[in-house]
Amino acid sequence: MGVRSFLDCKNMKLGDKLSPNIDKAIFDCKVGVVVFSPNYCDSYYCLHELALLMETKKRAVPILFDVELSQLMVKDDGTRSQEQLLRYNLALQEAKDTVALPFDSLNGDWSELLRKAADAVIMNLMEADHE
């Protein structure tokens, strides 16, 4: 179908700078898959990438991996500026307003998760091409 995916561990080589390459991939993409996990909001990189995805108005396919939407919160641990906290909270709220695919890793069907996620990406790509 001509779908090109980006995954840092697959598309980058040792020694490449993370942020510029990941930021470029987000700017160049049409659809981003966001895998929310219990520790997602503790990661600067995850929150930065989510904010960039939302700020550039890309379509998102959120996956709730062992986490509920209500558990996703940006915490002020003193390491982030007020501007960053606002940016991350706005992005997280926008993502929460998007229909998500829940997945329980202990009881869920992994092949079903992959099929549903792939179908959602393809559907969103087709819709993005018609905008």
Image (cartoon, helix red, strand yellow):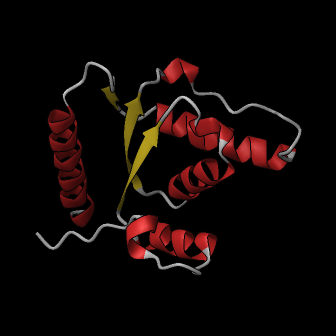
Q: Where in the figure is residue 49, as x and y percent of width and height? A: 56, 56
Up-down relation of residue 123 to residue 2 (above or below): above
Up-down relation of residue 96 to residue 15 (above or below): above
In the image, what residue occupies the spot 35% across and 32% down?
100
State which quarter of the image contains the N terminus.
Answer: bottom left
How many numbered marks does the figure carry? 0
Q: Where in the figure is residue 56, as x and y percent of width and height? A: 52, 61
Closest to the observer: 66 or 63? 66
The answer to which image quadrant residue 85 occupies is: top right
Side (left or right) of 106 relative to 65: left
Up-down relation of residue 8 to residue 85 (above or below): below
The answer to which image quadrant residue 72 occupies is: top right
Q: Where in the figure is residue 106, as x and y percent of width and height? A: 32, 21
Side (left or right) of 18 relative to 26: right
Q: Where in the figure is residue 5, as x and y percent of width and height? A: 30, 67
In the image, what residue occupies the spot 64% across and 28% down?
73
